[in-house]
């Protein structure tokens, strides 16, 4: 028992001793570690201090070197600027010296010029005195003053110049007129000879031949039904009289007359004449005439070699086959004007195609002037603008009767071609009575104006010459009188083409040598 207790006590003591020994050992180890850490810390601090001092020294050295370098650069730059300033100063000094030298030279020149100016003044005074003496001597010798002599010389020279100028102008005008007349006649004669078209006088009636007089009764129908139906559908009057085997179609519209003629001829061939059949035949004839109109327009354009015309203008061209002006077929006239315009344009170097196109379309307004209000010129201009024709074509259409000023040579060529076509013998017709009445009216209109002595209608009424009393009408009054006469003629007369008004004033002085 005691042994156990002693053993336990010894074990406890041994454990306590072991514990204290362990603690002491641990403390000793910790103290040794702390000491070594403090030593390392001091070493680190010492190294850091040494490193910082070394870097500080290096920084100070770099700053010192940089400052020395900057100082050296400033000194070098300062030295260079000082050298440049010295160089500029030398240049300025040299320029000042040269300016001083120039100023001195200028001063010397001014002195010389002043002396020369004085000399020139003395010489001018002497020259003026000598000139005056010379003029006085010349006036004494000639018996004329200087102004009188100057006027005499100027008048002599002026008369000579006037005479020479007038002679030169007269010669130039004479040569120009001779050449212009000669060339114009050559061009016109050539164009007329190369373009000759037949003209057939159109009337207001058409005649349909019948196989027998029995057909007249069938055309009239029971109680006149057939003839009334035909007249109503076509707008043409049928004249059935004692003329053997013939029926006369009367109407001012040639297209309607043509429709009625074709329908009536087909009815006669068919033999079945009644209102329903008449209506059918009139409709077919209308379609045939429309087709004919288009074909005629295309044929006209093809004949003169004009392409690219709007289809509607082609149709209107075809309608002109059934339109006449003073007995002249409008389509034939347009074709002839196109050909003449092309020939004239070729002679003077213009665009031949453009001239032909303008000539072909110049009277296009006549195709619908019965249906649309206004002159055929204005209608034609509106049609050309509507179907996008060029400004040259529009001006040619607008100016071909002189209503507006021609702006291109093509318009002038179309004017000439239109006049040639209308004035050719046989192209247009008028009754003798109408012709003589127009000439009388022309002369009567002009004789009504104050100051008119005599008047003469010449060139088949295309020109009126008016002789005036010179004491009553001045040169300025002549211009106004010609315009007033032209306006009066336009207002009171109807005539083809245009009428030229010539007002002539002649003064004569008579004396006798005794």
Image (tube, rainbow, N blue to C red):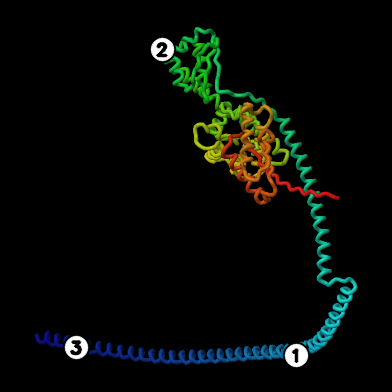
- Which class describes the residues within 10 Å of circle 3: few (<14), some (14-19), or many (20+)? few
Circle 2/circle 3 CB separation < 8 Å? no
Residue that sits furthest to the left in the current view? 1
Q: CA distance from mark 1 to mark 2?
A: 133 Å
> In the structure shown, which secondary structural element does the residue marked by tag 1 occupy?
helix
Which of the two discs, 2 and 3, labels the residue nearer the N terminus? 3
Compared to residue 76, the image places residue 231 above or below, namely above
> In the structure shown, which secondary structural element does the residue marked by tag 3 occupy?
helix
Compared to residue 396, the image places residue 128 above or below, namely below
Viewer-nearest residue: 342 or 84:
342
Find residue 250 and report its horizontal and vertical position in percent. Answer: 52, 20
Residue located at (62% from left, 43% from top): 449
Q: Is residue 395 visible?
A: no
Image position of 438 (left or right of 511): left
Residue located at (49% from left, 21% from top): 236
Q: CA distance from mark 1 to mark 3?
A: 123 Å
Image position of 214 (left or right of 437): left
Q: Which residue is mark 2?
A: 223
Q: Which residue is mark 3?
A: 16
Residue located at (55% from left, 37% from top): 380
Residue located at (36% from left, 90% from top): 36
Q: Give the number of the mark in front: 1 or 2.
A: 2
Which of the two discs, 1 and 2, labels the residue nearer the N terminus? 1
Compared to residue 474, the image places residue 221 above or below, namely above
Compared to residue 195, the image places residue 506 above or below, namely below
Which disc, if any, is residue 100?
1
Find residue 156 and report its horizontal and vertical position in percent. Answer: 83, 62
Find residue 25 and report its horizontal and vertical position in percent. Answer: 28, 89
Residue 311 lies in quadrant: top right
């Amino acid at each position: 028992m005691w042994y156990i207790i002693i053993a336990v006590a010894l074990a406890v003591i041994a454990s306590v001793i072991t514990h204290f020994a362990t603690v002491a050992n641990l403390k000793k180890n910790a103290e040794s570690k702390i000491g070594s850490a403090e030593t390392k810390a001091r070493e680190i601090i010492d190294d850091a201090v040494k490193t910082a001092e070394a870097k500080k020294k290096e920084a100070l050295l770099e700053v010192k070197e940089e400052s020395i370098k900057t100082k050296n650069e400033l000194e070098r730059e300062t030295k260079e600027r000082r050298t440049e300033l010295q160089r500029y100063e030398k240049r300025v000094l040299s320029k000042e010296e040269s300016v001083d030298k120039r100023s001195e030279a200028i001063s010397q020149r001014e002195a010389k010029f002043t002396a020369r100016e004085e000399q020139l003044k003395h010489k001018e005074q002497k020259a003026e005195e000598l000139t005056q003496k010379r003029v006085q001597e010349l006036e004494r010798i000639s018996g004329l003053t200087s102004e009188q002599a100057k006027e005499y010389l100027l008048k002599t020279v002026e008369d000579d110049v006037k005479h020479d100028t007038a002679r030169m102008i007269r010669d130039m005008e004479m040569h120009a007129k001779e050449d212009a007349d000669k060339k114009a006649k050559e061009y016109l004669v050539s164009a007329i000879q190369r373009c000759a078209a037949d003209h057939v006088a159109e009337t207001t009636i058409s005649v349909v031949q019948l196989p027998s007089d029995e057909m007249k009764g069938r055309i009239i129908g029971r109680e006149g039904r057939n003839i009334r139906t035909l007249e109503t559908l076509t707008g043409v009057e049928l004249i059935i009289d004692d003329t053997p085997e013939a029926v006369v179609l009367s109407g001012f519209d040639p297209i309607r007359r043509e429709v009625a003629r074709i329908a009536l001829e087909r009815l006669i061939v068919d033999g079945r004449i009644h209102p329903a059949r008449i209506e059918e035949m009139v409709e077919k004839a209308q379609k045939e005439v429309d087709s004919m109109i288009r074909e005629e327009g295309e044929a006209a354009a093809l004949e003169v070699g004009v392409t690219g015309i709007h289809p509607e203008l082609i149709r209107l061209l075809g309608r002109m086959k059934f339109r006449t002006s003073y007995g002249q077929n409008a389509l034939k006239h347009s074709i002839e004007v196109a050909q003449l315009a092309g020939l004239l344009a070729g002679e003077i170097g213009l665009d031949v195609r453009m001239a032909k196109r303008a000539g072909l379309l110049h009277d296009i307004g006549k195709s619908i002037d019965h249906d649309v209000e206004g002159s055929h010129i204005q209608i034609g201009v509106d049609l050309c603008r509507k179907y996008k024709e060029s400004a040259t074509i529009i001006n040619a259409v607008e100016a071909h009767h002189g209503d507006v000023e021609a702006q291109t040579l093509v318009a002038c060529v179309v004017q000439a071609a239109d006049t040639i076509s209308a004035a050719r013998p046989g192209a247009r017709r008028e009754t003798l009575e109408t012709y003589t009445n127009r000439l009388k009216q022309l002369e009567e209109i002009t004789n009504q104006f104050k100051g008119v002595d005599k008047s003469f209608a010449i060139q088949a009424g295309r020109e009126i010459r008016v002789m005036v009393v010179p004491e009553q009408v001045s040169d300025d009054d002549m211009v106004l009188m010609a315009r007033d006469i032209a306006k009066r003629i336009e207002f009171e007369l109807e005539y083809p083409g245009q009428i030229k008004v010539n007002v002539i004033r002649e003064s004569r002085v008579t004396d006798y040598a005794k």
